[in-house]
Image: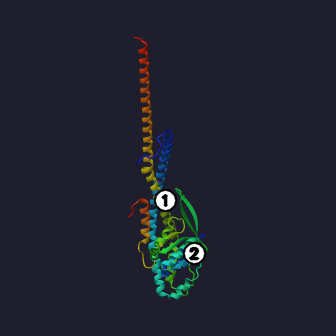
Amino acid sequence: MYKIAVMGDKDSICGFVSVGLDIFPLTEHDEAVKKLRNLAENDYAVIFITEKLYSLIETEADKYKAAPIPAIIPIPGITGNSGIGMAAVSKSVEQAVGSDILK
Amino acid sequence: MAVMNVNPTRMELTNLKRKLTTARRGHKLLKDKRDELMRRFMLLVRENKELRKTVEAKIADANAHMAVARSVMSDEELDIALMVPMQEMSVNIHEKNVMSVMLPVFESSFRTADKSDIYSYGYAFTSSDLDDAVKSLSDIMPELLRLAEVEKSCRLMASEIEKTRRRVNALEHVMIPQYEETIKYIAMKLDENERSATTRLMKVKDMMLKDAHDYGDAAGFM
């Protein structure tokens, strides 16, 4: 049985507690990287990260790209949608096809 | 394309021909794999984009509710209301094999079956906006999970497609031409050897015949 985690600034993610996800309010790069590694080793299959935090630790998140779990998914936080999530999708299209043909 | 550094022998030729057949077969198979992966990837990535659009809009909606709730209630009240969750969500993972790429399939399960267990607080001291926020978050969970599944699958497939494409190209543009040229080189070399052997034999025969005639002459047939 795997768990789901949400990382990001507290205001953006506190609602997810009620749905039954584990939240980790973090905003600093170093803490977040440490936590991400920790979560990845500890049966978390899905890790949602607010876009703001995701942009800070993208290199770390990319390390788990090839593994089937965890799935690290950027979600928009309370500060709004910055388009990082869409950019990540476009990036995988680019990797597969050679250019982003779905623009 | 460079000819490989091999001895031009019949054995080498047979080996190379066998290798060429294998390479051609592998090339065809990998090409099929690439095409099928690409087809599935395009389907999946379209779904991914749609899903992301809707989920992002819905999260923004939930966040708006949350912002209102936060403005109505004090921080402490909100923290207390959300301190002990009633519901616990976990996922089961199956693996789906698509053209030898293992894709995860997430299946959510909850600790309690009751849908209203998402409200971890009494209604007396909290704003109804908090209820709305929690409700909207809970409503998007299935979509959010599906998004996670699809997005992960897309990434895994993208890297597999890249790998397969490289292999196809390496076979098509490097290995197969190299084998073909080496085979041609060896065949020509062997033909050349054969021709030179024939010529030599003819020459020797000529010489022997001439010797025989000369010998005959000397014996005085005329």
Q: Identify the residue shown where x is 44% and y is 19%.
A: B212
Q: Identify the residue shown where x is 57% and y is 75%.
A: B115
Residue A42: horizontal and vertical position, in percent? 58, 72
Quick check: B134 left or right of B215?
right
Residue B160 disc label: 1
Q: Nearer the viewer, mark 1 or mark 2?
A: 1
Quick one: B172 or B9, which is closer to the camera?
B9
Q: Secondary structure at mark 1?
A: helix
Per the image, the residue denoted by label 2 is B115
- Disc nearer the start of the sequence (1/2): 2
Q: Secondary structure at mark 2?
A: helix
Vertical comparison of B23 with B201: above or below: below
Q: Identify the residue shown where x is 44% and y is 22%.
A: B208
Vertical comparison of B168 with B204: above or below: below
Which residue type does callout 1 highlight? Answer: Glu
Q: Is residue B53 visible?
A: no
Which residue type does callout 2 highlight? Answer: Lys
Q: Is residue B170 visible?
A: yes
**Cα distance, mark 1 to mark 2?**
39 Å
Q: Which residue lies most toward the front here?
A: B218
Residue B214: horizontal and vertical position, in percent? 41, 18
The chain that hosts pointer 1 is: B
The quarter in which the C terminus of chain A is drawn is: bottom left
